[in-house]
Image: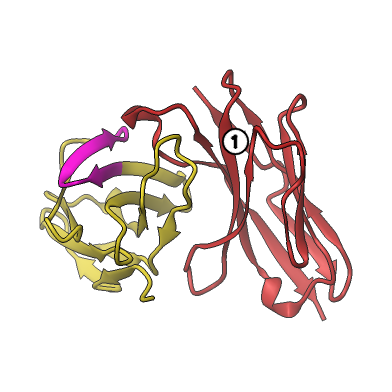
Chain colours: A red, B yellow
């Protein structure tokens, strides 16, 4: 079974600086998708970025980028120029790309609470 | 385009009662998934519905059930509520492409408190 591990329960960063959140996963599959979701105090789960395992190029979305290391099964999120609005819980999630109903679910990490210091 | 909506947003029930939560997906999305979020267990998959059929179910007791209507709206029901059912229940919708490549979009959640 696949598992997702986020080893940092909490991280803090000074506003305007850069922070990296860690995520590792365990799978025997070669094709899958990885996601970072953000959950602010409103509890709304918001997609930050996604990565296809078959793509070697790291995904980027404005100030957010990932470092995807497939062999190491690592998927870290880098937030540049941190802003107060980035304060939230960040969840790493995995989904198999193997077509089949039993695989169509997100498997979640425990989350990392990101604190932005003004 | 309107996002995923969930009703009600907050709910207080007592042990033994039952509850029904509703989710309206993004227009054009035919897949609806439900997740339970608690401080102790984190995010856990409940079930997924696609074209009015349950396609996958997580490891939850039979007290948790759901259904999907022809307009893709979904409901989940929890019978004989227990204190441990207190949680945030999140609904997510997607188009459900072959290969699982599409993104799930989440609603704001329903916060259930069982007393």
Q: Magenta stretch: give its range.
A: B47-59
Give the letter of the chain under mark 1: A
Q: Position of residue A24 (x, y in %)?
A: 69, 35
Q: How many neighbours does mark 1 have within 10 angstroms: few (below 14), some (14-19), or many (20 or more)?
A: many
Task: Locate residue A105: give its quadrant.
Answer: top left
Q: Position of residue A85 (x, y in %)?
A: 68, 77
Q: Is residue B111 magenta?
A: no
Instruction: Report the side of A56 relative to B68 (left or right).
Output: right
Query: In front here: A80 or B35?
Result: A80
Element at badge 1?
Answer: strand
Q: Residue furthest bottom?
A: A118
What residue is shown at x 71% (from left), y 56% (from top)? A10
Q: Position of residue A2 (x, y in %)?
A: 53, 27
Q: Position of residue B6 (x, y in %)?
A: 28, 69
What residue is shown at x 89% (from left), y 69% (from top)? A17
Q: Note whether A92 is above or below A94 in the view shown.
A: below
Q: Is residue B54 magenta?
A: yes
Query: In front here: A13 or A1?
Result: A1
Instruction: Identify the residue under disc 1.
Output: A4
Q: Is residue A60 visible?
A: yes
């Amino acid at each position: 079974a696949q598992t997702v591990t986020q080893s940092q329960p909490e991280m803090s960063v000074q506003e305007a600086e850069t922070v990296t959140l860690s995520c590792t996963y365990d799978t025997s599959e070669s094709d899958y998708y990885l996601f970072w979701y953000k959950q602010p105090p409103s509890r709304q789960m918001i997609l930050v970025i996604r990565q296809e395992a078959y793509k070697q190029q790291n995904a980027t979305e404005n100030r957010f980028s990932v470092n995807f290391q497939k062999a190491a099964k690592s998927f870290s999120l880098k937030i540049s120029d941190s802003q107060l609005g980035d304060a939230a819980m960040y969840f790493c999630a995995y989904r198999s790309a193997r077509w089949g109903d039993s695989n169509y679910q997100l498997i979640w990490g425990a989350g990392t609470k990101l604190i932005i210091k003004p | 385009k309107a996002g995923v909506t969930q009703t009600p947003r907050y709910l207080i029930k007592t042990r033994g009662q039952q509850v029904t939560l509703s989710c309206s997906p993004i227009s054009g999305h035919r897949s609806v998934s439900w997740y339970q979020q608690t401080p102790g267990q984190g995010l856990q998959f409940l079930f997924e519905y696609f074209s009015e059929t349950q396609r996958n179910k997580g490891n939850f007791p039979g007290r948790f059930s759901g259904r999907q209507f022809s307009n893709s709206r979904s409901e989940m029901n929890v019978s004989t509520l227990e204190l441990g059912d207190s949680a945030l229940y999140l609904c997510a919708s997607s188009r459900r492409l072959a290969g699982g490549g599409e993104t799930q979009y989440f609603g704001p959640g329903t916060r259930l408190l069982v007393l």
